[in-house]
Image (tube, rainbow, N blue to C red):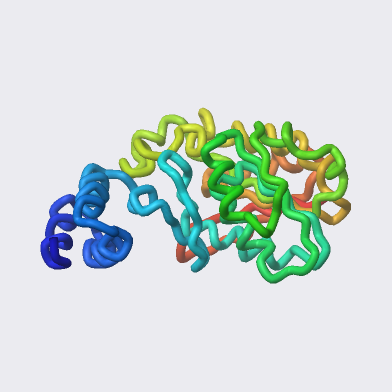
């Protein structure tokens, strides 16, 4: 199968960036049979990242497995904001870490930072351990704070909480490659999309160091409630917005 034929096949399947995807598939496949298997999966609707086993976030490649949440480029606002708050020698905690991409991008280039990451999905944690190899050996399976070492109480300078925030009723309107091929738990935030944030907000203050900050995302209609939840948890929230990508990062400081 040549590039032109592959591009036509991908375009017919509805792939918007068919030419670029053809380039990546051809580069990744070692044999004709492997290429056919990969193309068949992509045409069937599997995310390209799952087909290739690699995702890119902030220009950095990350291993990703079937079913694992693929980091969205819009979340680069969260990592950029986090990098502006972190300092050398700090402590960063990445809850719902997925592939570990956010934590790695945030701590990259800082000296002496301790990074701890957790996720409830063992498959995601396996990806994160591979991606964070050489950066952190503290990547744990657990529900939110349950697997975090108790020694971190009161010492976290930066808490990344990229929790699911899609309201349950809106899951049906997501693109198929997200809705069908990513773990439901990585998307579904409950009736108003803020169920997981409620649990994080209730505990975050006792984990944060004085002056430490929690970072999360929220939709425009969720900002008021998200701020109220974080204030009730003893934190001082504000919002950083990128109007072009329509992304809202809520920062809440202790």
Which residue reaches farthest bottom? 109
Where does the N terminus fall, quadrant-wise?
Answer: bottom left
In the rendered image of this protein, does residue 21 appear above or below residue 218?
below
Could you tell me which residue is drawn at 14 percent across and 55 percent down?
9
In the image, what residue occupies the spot 41% across and 41% down? 66
- The residue sitting at 54% across, 47% down in the picture is 127
Q: Is residue 70 above or below residue 30?
A: above
Q: Is residue 254 left or right of residue 108?
A: right
Q: Nearer the viewer, residue 169 or 113?
A: 113
Q: Position of residue 86 (x, y in %)?
A: 75, 63
The picture places residue 213, in percent across and down from the top left corner, at 76, 53
Q: Quadrant of residue 251?
A: bottom right
* Image height of 125 relative to 212, above or below: above
Percent position of residue 156, x then y? 81, 50
* Left or right: 124, with 45 as reference point: right
The x, y position of residue 176, in whole percent, is: 31, 41
Total numbered circles:
0
Q: Residue at image x 57%, y 51%?
A: 130
206 relative to 35 in the view: left or right: right
């Amino acid at each position: 199968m040549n590039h032109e034929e592959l591009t036509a096949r991908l375009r017919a399947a509805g792939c918007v960036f068919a030419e670029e995807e053809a380039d990546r598939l051809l580069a990744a496949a070692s044999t004709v049979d492997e290429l056919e298997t990969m193309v068949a999966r992509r045409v069937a609707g599997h995310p390209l990242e799952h087909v290739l086993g690699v995702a890119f976030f902030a220009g950095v490649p990350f291993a990703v497995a079937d079913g694992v949440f693929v980091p969205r480029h819009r979340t680069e606002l969260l990592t950029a904001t986090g990098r502006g708050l972190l300092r050398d020698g700090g402590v960063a905690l990445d809850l719902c870490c997925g592939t570990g991409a956010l934590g790695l991008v945030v701590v990259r280039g800082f000296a002496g930072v301790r990074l701890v990451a957790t996720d409830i999905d063992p498959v995601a944690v396996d990806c994160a351990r591979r991606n964070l190899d050489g950066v952190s050996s503290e990547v744990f399976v657990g529900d939110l704070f349950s697997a975090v070492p108790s020694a971190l109480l009161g010492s976290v300078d930066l808490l990344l909480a990229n929790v699911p925030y899609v309201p349950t009723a809106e899951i049906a309107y997501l693109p198929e490659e997200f809705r069908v091929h990513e773990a439901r738990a990585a998307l579904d935030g409950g009736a108003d999309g803020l169920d997981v944030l409620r649990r994080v907000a209730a505990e975050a203050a006792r984990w944060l160091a004085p002056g430490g900050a929690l970072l999360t995302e929220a939709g425009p209609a969720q900002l008021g409630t998200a701020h109220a939840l974080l204030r009730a948890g003893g934190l001082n929230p504000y919002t950083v917005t990128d109007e072009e990508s329509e992304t809202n990062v809520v920062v809440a400081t202790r």
